[in-house]
Structure formats: structure tokens, C-alpha cells
Image (cartoon, coloured by chain):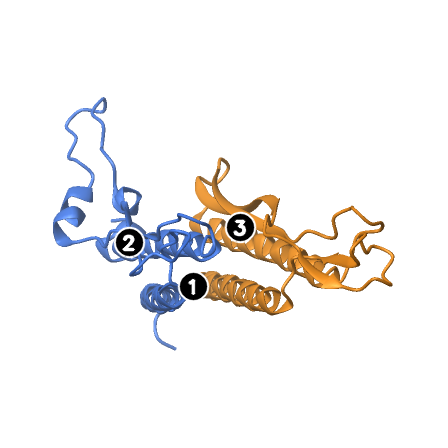
């Protein structure tokens, strides 16, 4: 069994990928905070159903396509922050900064769990000292 | 490009656009008293930066740029000063349509947006550092 392909690691990797993608969407919003007519966007949060759907399709023949997998399927949706300003811009810097620090904390949590899991495997490989 | 590097590039484009805006504001403020060189000519006209988002093909992200700089069409104010070299026959001088108060507000807004981009850059940097710590 390939331990790095276990559901724990692939799940955490997908989580990290999603959070990194969300960071770049929020960075787009912040960069365009003064662009007339720009509407803030966000990534659709993955739910259980989409997580199940994102699992690679079972293939019984090497010519079958596996289908999209993981965070690559995360959708960008318009998420305006309240009312538009006079130039039609719908970005609130405060909301975006909040989203950004939220994403960073989630990212640090996921990467911390990943690190701990790697530590466990390391422990199993060389034994407690 | 991975998402974190893309985010860094996006924040950099935001900072570049905002610093360009600060440059335009500085030009306006510096020329707040620049009258015409001779009677009958126009004095300094206030410049207005216009931002627009564009799709960066390399990363597929919406970056921001200063699309163009337009001139403020509002009328010049007149000051009665017959001794001035740029005064017309009635003794009036046209002053630039720059309001230092508005320019300062604009400067503050640009500064705030610049700091927001800088904050985003810092957060992305700490996320990349968290990833690298997995290797430790």
C-alpha cells in the first residue's frame, strides 16, 4: 500500500490545494478593490456530495477517462460584498482581508496536520528513540 | 504556475497599480499651483488614473492595471491678479482644477489599498512557509 496515497494524505492535499486556490481568488479581489465595475468572487466551498463526485471515476478499461478529480473542480462564483460603490465596484477590503486570514489559518491547520501525519510515519519507520 | 505564486503575482499587480496612482496624485499635488505660461493658455489640468482588470494569460488570473490616465474636465477657477504674467485682459488668472483636499483623500485611499495588497502578500508568504515546514 502506498502510504502517501492514503485518504488522509490525498484529502489533506486536496484541502491545501483548495485553500491555495481560494487565496489567489481573494488576492484578485484585493488587487481589484479599486477597479470600476469589478464584482468580488469566491470559491464554492466543497460539500460532501461534490467531494464524492470528485473521486476519480472507476475505470474498467485503460481507455476510460478518470474524470476531474479533487480541488480542480472547485468553482469560482460571484460573491459581492454588500452594496456597490458609485463606480459599481463590489469589493469590501475588510471582508476580503478577513477571508484571507481565515484561509491562512485553515491552511496552517491543514499543513500542520499533514506534518504530524508525516511525523507518525517517520516514527513508524525508525521506531521511538 | 501554482496558486500561491499566482496569488503573489496578483498582489504585485495590485501594488504596482496603486503605486502608479500615488505617482499621479503626487503629480497633481506638485502642480496644484502651476498656472499657464502665457495669457490665453490653460494651466495644469488634473489627471485621473483609471484602473481596469485584465486576464493574465500566463496564470489565468484577473490582474489589475492602470489602463489609462484621463484629464479632469472640470472648469478652472479664476483668480483676480492683474500683476500675474498669465493674467488675461480683465486681470483674471486661470488656476489648475486641483483640489489638494481631494488629492489627499485619494492618496490615503491608494495607501490603504496598497497596504491591503501588501498584507495579502504577507499572508501568502506565511502559507508557503507553512508548506515548506512539512519538510522539516
Which residue is found at the position 22% from the left and 32% from the top? A66
Which residue is found at the position 15% from the left and 42% from the top? A53
Instruction: Tell me where residue A21 appears, x and y as whole percent.
Output: 37, 51
Q: Secondary structure at mark 3?
A: helix
Pointer 2: residues within 10 angstroms few (<14), some, or many (20+)?
A: some
Q: Secondary structure at mark 1?
A: helix
Q: Image quadrant of residue A54?
A: top left
Residue A128 versus residue B29: which sits nearer the camera?
A: B29
Which residue is found at the position 51% from the left and 61% from the top? B117
Label 3, on which residue?
A: B9
The chain that hosts pointer 1 is B
Q: Is residue A112 left or right of residue B23?
A: left
The chain that hosts pointer 2 is A
Q: Colour of chain B?
A: orange
Q: Is residue A95 above or below residue B64?
A: below
- Disc sitting over residue B134 in the figure: 1
Q: Foreground mark, 1 or 2?
A: 2
The chain that hosts pointer 3 is B
Q: Secondary structure at mark 2?
A: loop
Q: Image quadrant of residue A115?
A: bottom left
Note whether residue A122 is visible. no
**Chain given the colour blue:** A
Q: Image quadrant of residue B92?
A: bottom right
Instruction: Tell me where residue B43 appears, x and y as whole percent.
Output: 75, 52
Note whether residue B131 is visible. yes
Pointer 3: residues within 10 angstroms few (<14), some, or many (20+)?
A: many
Q: Are marks 1 and 3 in contact (CB under 8 Å)?
A: no
Residue B33 versus residue A88: which sits nearer the camera?
A: B33
Label 2, on which residue?
A: A79
Residue A74 versus residue A58: which sits nearer the camera?
A: A74
Amino acid at each position: 500500500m502506498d502510504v502517501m496515497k492514503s485518504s488522509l494524505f490525498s484529502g489533506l492535499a486536496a484541502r491545501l490545494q483548495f485553500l491555495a486556490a481560494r487565496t489567489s481568488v481573494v488576492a484578485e479581489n484585493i488587487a481589484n478593490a479599486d477597479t470600476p465595475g469589478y464584482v468580488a468572487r469566491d470559491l464554492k466551498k466543497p460539500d460532501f456530495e461534490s467531494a464524492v463526485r470528485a473521486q476519480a471515476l472507476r475505470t474498467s478499461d485503460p481507455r476510460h477517462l478518470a474524470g476531474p478529480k479533487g480541488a480542480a473542480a472547485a468553482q469560482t462564483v460571484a460573491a459581492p460584498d454588500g452594496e456597490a460603490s458609485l463606480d459599481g465596484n463590489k469589493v469590501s477590503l475588510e471582508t476580503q482581508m478577513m477571508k484571507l486570514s481565515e484561509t491562512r489559518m485553515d491552511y496552517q491547520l491543514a499543513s500542520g496536520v499533514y506534518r504530524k501525519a508525516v511525523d507518525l510515519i517517520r516514527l513508524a519507520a525508525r521506531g521511538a528513540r | 504556475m501554482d496558486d500561491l505564486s499566482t496569488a503573489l503575482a496578483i498582489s504585485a499587480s495590485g501594488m504596482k497599480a496603486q503605486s502608479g496612482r500615488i505617482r499621479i496624485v503626487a503629480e497633481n499635488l506638485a502642480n496644484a499651483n502651476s498656472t499657464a505660461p502665457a495669457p490665453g493658455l490653460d494651466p495644469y489640468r488634473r489627471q485621473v488614473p483609471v484602473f481596469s482588470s485584465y486576464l493574465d494569460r500566463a496564470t489565468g488570473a484577473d490582474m489589475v492595471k492602470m489602463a489609462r490616465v484621463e484629464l479632469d474636465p472640470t472648469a478652472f477657477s479664476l483668480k483676480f491678479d492683474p500683476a500675474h504674467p498669465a493674467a488675461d485682459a480683465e486681470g483674471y488668472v486661470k488656476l489648475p482644477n486641483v483640489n489638494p483636499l481631494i488629492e489627499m483623500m485619494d492618496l490615503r485611499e491608494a495607501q490603504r489599498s496598497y497596504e491591503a495588497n501588501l498584507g495579502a502578500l504577507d499572508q501568502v508568504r506565511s502559507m508557503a512557509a507553512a508548506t515548506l515546514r512539512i519538510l522539516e
